[in-house]
Image (tube, rainbow, N blue to C red):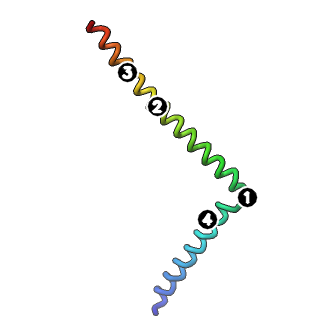
Amino acid sequence: MELSDLTNKTKKELNAKIEELESFITKKGIGSGYISKIERIQRRINIFFLLSAVTAVVGLLTWLTLKDGEETD
């Protein structure tokens, strides 16, 4: 086994362990409860704004359609 193969294998193993540790800290670390709560709130806000934008566009298109229909009568 060459030294470069051993070095690459060691780097991959260390990176995997670091990612595993970071994941553990994210799930169980100090403030993790607040972070997950904030992420849920942010998702809800994003969904609210998306639905609001869709509703506004549909309302505008409906208004324009009905407005054009009234002018031709």
CA separation in Å, label 3 and label 4:
48 Å
Seen at 62% across and 43% down, the residue is 41
Q: Amino acid at mark 3?
A: Thr
CA separation in Å, label 3 and label 1:
50 Å
Seen at 48% across and 36% down, the residue is 50
CA separation in Å, label 1 and label 4:
13 Å
Q: Amino acid at mark 2?
A: Ala
Earlier residue among tags 4 and 2: 4
Earlier residue among tags 1 and 4: 4
Earlier residue among tags 3 and 2: 2
CA separation in Å, label 1 and label 2:
36 Å
* Mark 3 surroundings within 10 Å by alpha-carbon count, few (fewer than 14), some (14 through 19), many (20 or more): few
Seen at 40% across and 26% down, the residue is 58
Q: Is residue 43 above or below residue 25?
A: above
The secondary structure type at the circle numbered 3 is helix
The secondary structure type at the circle numbered 4 is helix
* Mark 1 surroundings within 10 Å by alpha-carbon count, few (fewer than 14), some (14 through 19), many (20 or more): few
Q: Is residue 45 above or below residue 39?
A: above
User: Where is residue 44, by image quadrant?
Assistant: top right
Q: Which residue is mark 2?
A: 53
3 or 2: mark nearer the eye: 3
Q: Amino acid at mark 4?
A: Ser
Q: Which residue is mark 4?
A: 23
Question: Where residue 54 sits: x, y (%)?
Answer: 44, 32
| Quadrant holding the C terminus | top left
Q: Which label number is shown at residue 62?
A: 3
Along the line of sight, which residue is nearer the eye, 68 or 30?
68
Question: Where residue 37 sits: x, y (%)?
Answer: 66, 48
Say if mark 4 contacts mark 2, CB within 8 Å: no
Earlier residue among tags 3 and 1: 1
Q: Which residue is mark 1?
A: 30
